[in-house]
Image: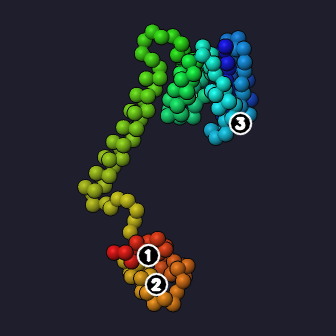
Amino acid sequence: MLIGYMRPYEDDLDCENQLRKLSKMNCELLISEEHSSAKKRTKLIYMINNLNQGDKVVVSKLFGLADSTRHLVELLEDISAKGAFLQSLDEDIDTSITSGYPFIDIVKHLVEFQSDVISEKTKRGLSEAKQKGIATGRPRKPDENVQRAIIMYQSKKYSLEEIKSETGISKSTLYRYLEH
């Protein structure tokens, strides 16, 4: 069964463009989300849960289906586990065509690549900051405020809320310094 899926997004809020493309594909069932939110896409979940072997989900573009590369991988795995397929018209992707490198593997490699790029950039940035003598991580609280908070706490005359408002030192930070 060909199942057309669409959801509103900024360039097609009323789903008219998607509907036009999916109608040309003669989809037997058309499913449309009522909102563009990534959360609570109940019709998508329902559709995935009720796929049968040999079904094909047809979307106008991959973004209409998934909100991120990682989300796309999850959906591709769910569709594949049901013995179903995905076809994206704009990207000219059809997972039912078995020749060539499987699309799901390509997307998995892209997710890994994306993660590696982010990790490498983060490490490089931390290294460069360290070489420049810039402290990384959360800024430390000024030592005089910490000392004042400890003295106030040990005097037992102030509540934790009063200590925080007076010194800017939270309860958890104060307890962390008291442990050392």
Q: Tell me where residue 31 appears, x and y as whole percent.
A: 71, 25
Between 36 and 170, the one nearer to me in the picture: 170
Which residue is at 32% across, 52% downward? Answer: 126
The answer to whether the residue labelled 2 contacts the one labelled 1, judged by CB atoms less than 8 Å apart, is yes
Tell me which numbered mark, 2 or 1, is placed earlier along the sequence.
2
Q: Measure the alpha-carbon separation of dots 2 and 1.
A: 9 Å
Tell me which numbered mark, 3 or 2, is placed earlier along the sequence.
3
Relative to 19, residue 41 above or below: below
Residue hosting label 1: 174
Which residue is at 67% across, 35% downward? Answer: 41
Label 1 amino acid?
Answer: Leu
Helix, strand, or loop for circle 1?
A: helix
Residue hosting label 2: 153
Helix, strand, or loop for circle 2?
A: helix
Most distant residue in the left direction = 131
In front: label 3 or label 2: 2
Helix, strand, or loop for circle 3?
A: loop
Label 3 amino acid?
Answer: His
Which residue is at 43% across, 23% downward? Answer: 105
In front: label 3 or label 1: 1
Q: Tell me where residue 70 appears, x and y as whole percent.
A: 50, 34
Quadrant in the rendering for residue 101:
top left
